[in-house]
Image (cartoon, rainbow, N blue to C red):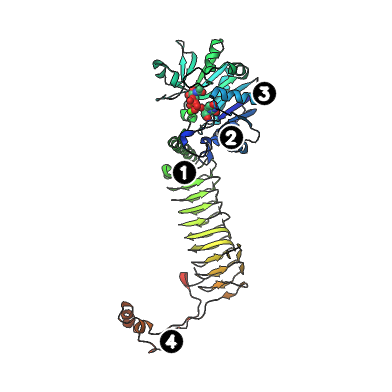
Amino acid sequence: MPPASASNLTVIVLAAGGGTRMKSKTMKVLHPLGGRSMIGHVLLAVQAIEPRRIVAVVGHQRDQVGAHIRSLVPDVVLAVQEDQHGTGHAVRVAMEALEGDGAGSGTVIVAYGDTPLLEGESLRAFAQEHEAAQRAVSILSGVVSDPYGYGRVVRDADGDVVAIVEEKDASRDEREIREINSGILAFDAAFLLDALPRLGNDNSKGEYYLTDTVGIARDAGLTVGAFAIDDVMQTEGANDRVQLAELGREMNRRIVTRWMRDGVTVMDPATTWIDADVVLAEDVTILPGTQLLGTTVVLEDAVIGPDTTLRDCEIGAGARVVRAHGELAVVRDGATVGPYSYLRPGTILGRDGKIGAFVETKNATIGDGAKVPHLSYVGDAEIGEGTNIGAGTIFANYDGVAKHRTRVGRHARTGSNNTFIAPVEIGDGAGTAGGTVVRRDVPPGALAVSSGPQRNHEGWALSRRPGTAQAEAAEAAGARPDGEREASHEAPDVGAGPYGGPES
Ligand code: UD1
Ligand code: CA
């Protein structure tokens, strides 16, 4: 976005107020929506117009608020307003913080830290309009159905702006005015410096109103004017948690709408939540009940959901993620996840790989085409390409003191209900029998078997559980009491099929 003013634009963001109606130990402007703090959204809009400097006025909890602002805008000028005596006082504190830095010329825009829907494009249009009209003061106004609580834009018979009158100071007639001051004002800097010391606090709140500058300019015969924004919600603030939720829902509606216009299928926009920094490719499909959060990126043709939450994840082209919860995980092209999978940080699932039902993974690199299909915990692991991990396998990574890694090679086949006691390595092309507890390395191509041979106590049900349904069923199937038949089933302990052995 080109700068609004090539010359000299200063933006002051007010964030000193307590925000008591939030009833929170967290300052109002730090409350998040769409994956960013309220003030984070405002600062992004402000940065988009490339002002020469940004001043933030902090007061309540200034350490936390100031540090947060500086983390987002490293070269911000922080001005501390010890006690909050009104918006006029706040701007005076901001201008004092700039003293000796050429703040007396150019344009100054004042915005609030609690208007998260504000867009840079609107600020830029406002600044340009203000500068083109060469006004002392411009008001970003809006026409609303319920103006209660706002300052009203008072115009004379010719329609020229005369003053802003605050709700508490307004006459009956003035209260009928539906054109309100959004709070965002633009000033000629020299005029602002001149007007600020002249503000009084003789009003119903006993505060120094920044809005009184409009009357001061008018009385001095300077130009003032208002620029109405159509999209009034961009300037709406959240004062309590009800309004925070409303603005959050509206922000989400806007983000989801934008992605649909950019070629993403969203089956149910109302139950789909997408944070501001998420990036989606064309032909991504999002099914109901899905939250894409943080810096999640989803590539084309991937299908996410239903009922999936992904935070800071990377999902490859054509991948499928069903009813999963993922954080800081990477799922490469064509891979499938879910249903009911938990991908914790450090999970990397290779191309065409699979993390199946009731599987939890953490710090695990699962190779291309490798599969962990059922009921497993895979922590601190490397699994080679094409390998299949049997159902119900636990990568026992924690010895009670430290975490250790497990390596499984390429094209290995491990049996069901295995436990891999880390640190341990299973070689390329190796196998393990069902129920194996792997405590020592398995060489490439070897089959590890750790459980003892199976013994069958013939006739056990009839001898030890006589008269039960179990015994009856056994008898009907030809069983006889203890020892009457020779033990005959000495099967090798390898098993087969999805629940018995290597072919899962
Ligand atoms: C203000 C405007 C009003 C406008 C409305 C829009 C004034 C006098 N009134 O009223 O015309 O319609 O916003 O929402 O400007 N702040 C400080 N320091 C202070 C006082 C306020 O930093 O000493 C900050 C607050 O944190 C807040 C913003 O300025 O972010 C607005 O202050 P607030 O007291 O909410 O003003 P309103 O009464 O809503
Ligand atoms: Ca307010």
Hey, what amino acid is under mark 2? Arg
Q: How far apart are the two marked residues, 4 and 3, measured between alpha carbons?
A: 97 Å
Q: Nearer the viewer, residue 98 or 488?
A: 98
SS class, disc 3: loop
Does mark 2 have its CB less than 8 Å from ligand 1? no
Disc 3 target residue? 99
Q: Please name which of the two marks, 4 or 3, marks the residue nearer to the observer.
A: 3
Disc 4 target residue? 487
Task: Please give the name of the residue rendered at 49% of the width and 30% of the height, measured from the top-left corner.
Answer: 234
SS class, disc 2: helix
Give coordinates of residue 141: x percent, y percent. 49, 22
Disc 1 target residue? 273
Q: Earlier in the sequence, mark 2 or mark 3?
A: 2
Give coordinates of residue 81: x percent, y percent. 59, 28
Crowd class of label 1 (few under 14; some 14 to 19; many from 20; radius 10 Å): many
Q: Earlier in the sequence, mark 1 or mark 2?
A: 2
Give left or right: position of 386 versus 485.
right
Disc 2 target residue? 62
SS class, disc 4: loop
Q: How far apart are the two marked residues, 1 and 4, measured between alpha carbons?
A: 62 Å
Task: Please give the name of the residue rendered at 47% of the width and 60% of the height, measured from the top-left corner.
Answer: 358
Does mark 4 have its CB less than 8 Å from ligand 1? no
* The N terminus sits in image quarter: top right
Give coordinates of residue 474: x percent, y percent. 34, 81
Marks 1/3 in contact by CB < 8 Å: the verdict is no
Q: How far apart are the two marked residues, 2 and 3, measured between alpha carbons?
A: 21 Å
Q: How far apart are the two marked residues, 4 and 2, measured between alpha carbons?
A: 80 Å
Task: Please give the name of the residue rendered at 60% of the width and 32% of the height, measured from the top-left corner.
Answer: 47
